[in-house]
Amino acid sequence: MAIDHKTKALVYYLSRFQGLSIRQVARECNVSRATVWRISKMDMSNNGCKKTRRETRGRPRKLNKRQERKLRRSIQILREQEGNFTIKRLMENACICRKDVSESTISRFLNKEGYYYLQARKKGLLTKTDMKKRRTFARRMQNEYSHDVWTQDIAFYLDGTGFAYKRNPLDQALAPKGRVWRKRSEGLTPGCTAKGQKTGTGGRVVKLMVAISYDKGVVICKAYDKLDGRYFANIIDENFESMFGTADKSLKRLWLQDGDPSQNSAMARAAMDRANCELLKIPPRSPDLNPIENIFKLVSDALRKQAIRSQITKETYEEFKNRVISTIQSLPLEVINNTIASMPNRVKEIIKRKGQRLRY
């Protein structure tokens, strides 16, 4: 029930000018003690409506609640439809006029919501079909293989990689990378990743065929010029017997690689039959299911740090090639073992995330 103005004035007078206690005023005016306390704190010169400092300070808000909701929706829509976008494009999609709201205001709002203009992680683009295949593979690994298949049964993890040669490594190490608007926790969210790096662009590339094994480290690091079915078949015929011997795992002769066409061609499969080995092939666009990809990332980071630490401003192709091979072969065994040992947890996480990319 609303309190009339006479009662409010009486409460205010008794508490502020007569010095009565809150309990005495409440009994005298037949109101609650909370009401007495609230009225006694009012500024009666504004008809009982006290304007706090928080309500009056600062400039008026430029974005209303509806515009903020439209901005949040537009971020998700533009991620699916266009991928990367600017603040200007975001404002257009949210129907916000640039005459009324500045880009700086939108930038501050995005920062407040947790979005920052961060580097896009180059992990490739996953489709719904890819995520379904990834979840199926993870379930098969859990149901058909033992928990220690990654460390005790798989002899080695093999893949080809390339490191782009630059005459000035220091300049390349300090170069800025591509960026997108995302939260810090959305590094692997669909729409926040960039296309994978294409080996061979930007000049000469040091191409290597590398394999790692649990408790054995790097079992092969071989340079090549062109990877095709014939060359990979020769790799199998000439090196697999010694690689399985070095790995010294189970009699299954199980090994893992991705779905590269050259490494899965008819000539390559025939060589696998001759080697009497069993291939465990991971789904497409799934580098997080091959631990050797983590090793390549560590090597790439190490090469960049070397260029900065040693201030390498000039380097020949052969010097760069030797530096790459030396960095790979000098990787600590503990790092390789810990990377491979993380695979059971990755499989569980892929099933939990329904095939989405992992943070690895």
Image (spheres, rainbow, N blue to C red):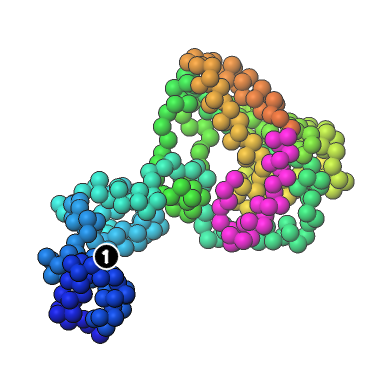
- Badge 1 crowding class, 10 Å Cα cut-off, few under 14, some 14 to 19, many 20 or more, is few
Q: Is residue 267 visible?
A: no
Q: Of all residues shown, which one is farthest toward the right?
A: 251
User: Could you tell me which residue is drawn at 26 percent across and 54 percent down?
Assistant: 91
- Residue 304 x/y as whole percent: 53, 26
Q: Quadrant of the C terminus?
A: top right
Magenta portion: prevailing SS class: helix
Q: Residue at x 61, y 20 (%)?
A: 323
Look at the image and say whether residue 240 sits in the magenta stretch.
no
Residue 136's place in the image compared with 21, above or below, is: above
On the image, numbered disc 1 is attached to which residue? Answer: 66
The magenta stretch is 334-360
Is residue 301 rendered to the left or right of residue 40?
Answer: right
Front residue of 199 and 58: 58
Question: 53 left or right of 131?
Answer: left
Residue 96 is situated, as x and y percent measured from the top left of the image, at 22, 57
Residue 317 or residue 178, whichever sits in front:
178
Compared with 228, 7 (above or below) is below
Is 175 displayed left or right of 253 in the figure?
left
Name the outermost residue toward the bottom.
1
Q: Is residue 108 visible?
A: yes
Q: x%, y% of residue 78?
A: 35, 56
Q: Is residue 358 magenta?
A: yes
The structure residue drawn at horizontal position 73% and vertical position 34%, both measured from the top left corner, is 334
Across and down, in percent, residue 130 comes to: 57, 57
Q: Quadrant of the N terminus?
A: bottom left
Q: Relative to 282, say whether 275 is above or below.
A: above
Q: Amino acid at mark 1?
A: Arg
User: Disc 1 on helix, strand or loop?
Assistant: helix
Instruction: Kindly identify the residue that appears in the image at 71 percent across and 52 percent down.
Output: 344
Q: Is residue 114 left or right of residue 140?
A: left
Q: Nearer the viewer, residue 185 or 119?
A: 185
